[in-house]
Amino acid sequence: MHLILFLIFAVFCLAGAVNLLLQSHPINSALSLIVVMTSLAVLYLLLGAEFLAAAQVIVYAGAIMVLFTFVVMLLNAGREEQTRGSIAAKTVGFPAVVAILAVLASVILKAQGLGTASLVNGITSTVEVSKVLFTDLLLPFEVTSVLVLIAILGAVALASRGNGDQGRTVSK
Amino acid sequence: MTMLQFILWSLLKVAVVTVVMLIGVAYTVLLERKLVGRIQNRWGPSRVGPFGLLQPLVDGAKSFLKEDLIPDGVYKPLYILAPILSLGCALISIAVVPFGAPNVGPGGVHLFEISDVNIGLLVILGITSIGVYGVALAGWSSNNKYSLLGSLRSSAQLISYELALGLSLVGVVMRSGSFNLRVIVEDQSRLGMLTWNIFGGMQFLAFFIYLIAAYAETNRSPFDLVEAESELAGGYNVEYSSMKFAMFFMAEYANMITVGCVATLLFLGGWTSPFGKLIPEPQNILAHALFPIGWFVLKVFAFLCLYVWVRGTLPRFRYDQLMNFGWRILMPLAILNIIGTSLWLAFRAHM
């Protein structure tokens, strides 16, 4: 049952990713990326990480992709122009990509001692995740929160400098 | 139980809950029209059946029979997808809501909820986040300046108040220690009304923040400037007609019902009676199953009446007032609530 679900949602994920590259209108690409994010959330759920699956949907598909969609809508990006492409790039490019993927696959398949990530029946509860997050991984957690704070301050500084004094008058 | 049995039971539950939900949506529209009418000192719809009770049927028939226009310059795939997304997300989130007490029926099936997931509350928040796309894509694909402006304002409002909504629920989760909605309700059932999260759990500030954020999330008064008929000529759904418009309409009321269900489960004790153990449990198995559902429906109904009362009474916010309120007042208050609740819990744990 897990294998069937894995195959279905892995196909959705890959189909969304390929569709993102093949579409000419950016809004279709953004929506395909949303399909990819939600399929990834289901794959996390199949690995037993329920909190991570919910966080993926809420944060990635529900907030970050909304931002992407806003950008596409506001910038009114039209369909991309299809150029003809160079034949040299095609004759060298595709075989090179296949060769690189073959090298990567053989290296990964031959490596020992990598551990397993299998479709499990048990679920890692939120309590266990939070215990690890706030005891063993406390330093990365705090550093990430400082990083997010810096990003927020940077965004506010850029936005207020762009508007000059106009951004201030409305709230009074 | 076997996979086939599980699938059949689930399909049955989904069918029953969807039908009940859609009937609930239709009669919520009638409730609103009658209550707003009484607030404004007039009868609401009263001609069609006794007390206007057949009005939703007639409205449904009218919706089906209207002409379905698709304007020329719209981006068709997203124009058709947007109302489907809106209504779908509104109906999906009822799947994790438990509405009755006895947990297990014949063959190990959960009788009074469609699915019992450990992260039920996070599923509801996630579906709410996805529902923003219905609004955003509707406005953009309509190829109309007013629709685009309305949908952008609405999306900004929705994502701003999602924050206060989520933060206000953290206090409840801290008290119960779980995201599972059934566990949260059972945690409130010790002494009846005194241990409901709003009274004994001291989450009244969280309840009011949740209430206000929920009014903003469902685009209802006083936050309904998106569909402010006098300002934006209808907002994001101005180019929609007939069934697609009805789908947006139904999505709004279905969201109201879901939000009422979540408030009932988290703050008002779900299906537990306010008298707690004072009234002895009925021995008849049918009454034992139906009384909790009755209490649940009563509480959700009270919540919906509150919604309509606020709509009929308060004027609407201006857009900058709305954003100011969401970011600079509600969010800090919700964070204060989290800090207060955690300090209280730490104090209690040390005593």
Image (cartoon, coloured by chain):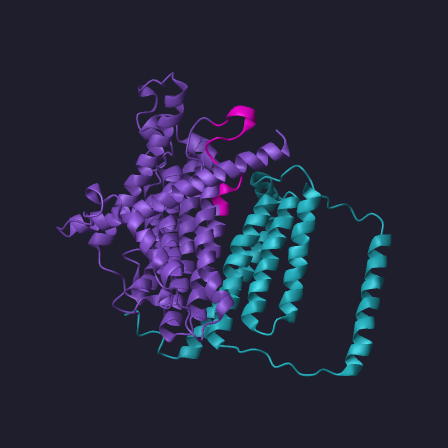
The residue positioned 31% from the left and 20% from the top of the image is: B278
Magenta-colored stretch includes residue B24:
no
Q: Quadrant of the N terminus of chain A?
A: top right
Can you say whether B79 is above or below A136 in the image? below
Q: Position of residue B280 (x, y in %)?
A: 34, 17
Q: Measuring 49% from the left and 66% from the top, which residue is drawn there?
A: B78
Which SS type dominates the magenta stretch?
Answer: loop
Q: How far from the left and from the top, in percent, is residue B65?
A: 35, 58
Q: Which chain is purple?
A: B
Q: Which residues are magenta?
A: B103-123
Place residue B23 in its image quadrant.
top left
Q: Spot the residue most to the left.
A: B41
From the viewer's side, name the closer residue of B159 and A166: B159
In which quadrant of the rendered view does residue B102 lie?
A: top left
Of A112 and A4, which appears nearest the observer?
A4
Q: Position of residue A115 (x, y in %)?
A: 78, 46
Comparing A117 with A148, the one in front is A117
- Is B120 magenta? The answer is yes
Q: Nearer the viewer, residue B278 or A42?
A: A42
Image position, residue B66 (x, y; %):
34, 61
Q: Residue furthest top?
A: B283
Residue B297 appears in which quarter of the rendering? top left
Q: What letter labels the chain drawn in cyan?
A: A
Q: Is residue A107 above or below residue A52?
A: below
Q: From the viewer's perspective, tell me whether residue B309 is left or right of residue B98.
A: left
Q: Could you tell me if residue B15 is visible in this image?
A: yes
Q: Is residue B327 above or below residue B304?
A: below
